[in-house]
Image (spheres, helix red, strand yellow):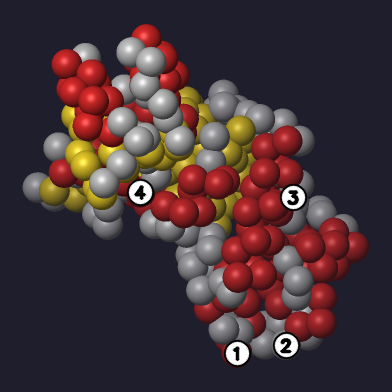
Amino acid sequence: MIEVDGLTKRFGDTTAVDDVSFTVRPGQVTGFLGPNGAGKSTTMRMMIGLDRPTSGTALVNGRPYRRHPAPLCVVGALLEGRALHRGRSARAHLLGLARTHGIPARRVDEVLAEAGLGAAAGRRAGDFSLGMSQRLGVAAALLGDPAVVILDEPVNGLDPDGVLWIRTMLKDLAAQGRTVLVSSHLMSEMAVTADHLLILSSGRLLTDTTVDAFISGVGASRCLVRSPEAARLREVLVADGAVVTSLEPGLLEVRGRDAPEIGTAAAAHRLVLHELTPHRASLEQAYMELMAS
């Protein structure tokens, strides 16, 4: 697990992370969201010892990252895709990392193949596109077969095939019982990848919940209802506390009541329904609503 307790980081008079506490558990993908400058990257850097906290702790599997004798085999991290020696080949870059931990060369070839870089293993990493650099960074994160994986904007620069690869990989890692923390600005990706959400804003933790609970609790859901008796149905639903908008003759948009409640109300008044379609709010809608509040 990743356990963050009272984590605070100040840079002079600026507080980048302000008394943040949360736990990232194994077996699920945890999405780390927030606007630019929210403190996500700084929090991740403190998790792996690149920044020292002003106060508080960040533990991985019960101890600080620096105290693990073989950290690459415990935590795999991608915080900057282009953090590599530009003159080395992709394989040489990973082989140098592997030798620091006694990881065999065959593992280097395995992760290069997993990242789709097998054919580019001998090319200079400095000549890689942003997407290829991201793939190499992910390969480095997986090199030690770690139990914990921390990725900061891993789909940045990737083409659609690369995005699908990242999505599938994250789900597979979680299914294997690993702890996965990933930040992204792509709400559409988090909606189909993440199981749990941590949302930061101005250095403070706003939300620590499941994706389903977040969307249900913050985002406004609605139902489209089509009926030949729409005018009467509107009166019934409004009297019951729903917010009803007439979109066109015979078609209503209903907020504040879910589909079973609408169907029950219609049946109680013997009103005919031709359509009853619930529309769940998207993660992006829920997120924007939270940020605006």
Mark 1 or 3 closer to N-term?
1
- Label 3's element? loop
Residue at image coords 42%, 52%: 187
Callouts 1 and 2 close, C-beta under 8 Å = yes
- Label 2's element? loop
Q: Where does the image place residue 286, in percent across and percent down from the top left?
A: 31, 40
Quadrant (top left/top right/bottom left/bottom right) for the C terminus: top left
* 130 vs 56, nearest the viewer: 130
Q: CA distance from mark 3 to mark 2?
A: 22 Å
Residue at mark 4: 284
Amino acid type of disc 3? Gly
Residue at mark 1: 127
Q: Residues within 10 Å of mark 2 (few under 14, many from 20)?
A: some
Direction from residue 14 to residue 260 in the image, left or right: right
Mark 4 or 1 closer to N-term?
1
- Label 1's element? helix
- Label 4's element? helix
Q: CA distance from mark 4 to mark 1?
A: 35 Å
Task: Give the vertical position of 204 relative to 120 (above or below).
Answer: above
Mark 4 or 3 closer to N-term?
3
Q: Where does the image place residue 260, in percent across and percent down from the top left?
A: 44, 19
Residue at mark 3: 144
Residue at mark 2: 123
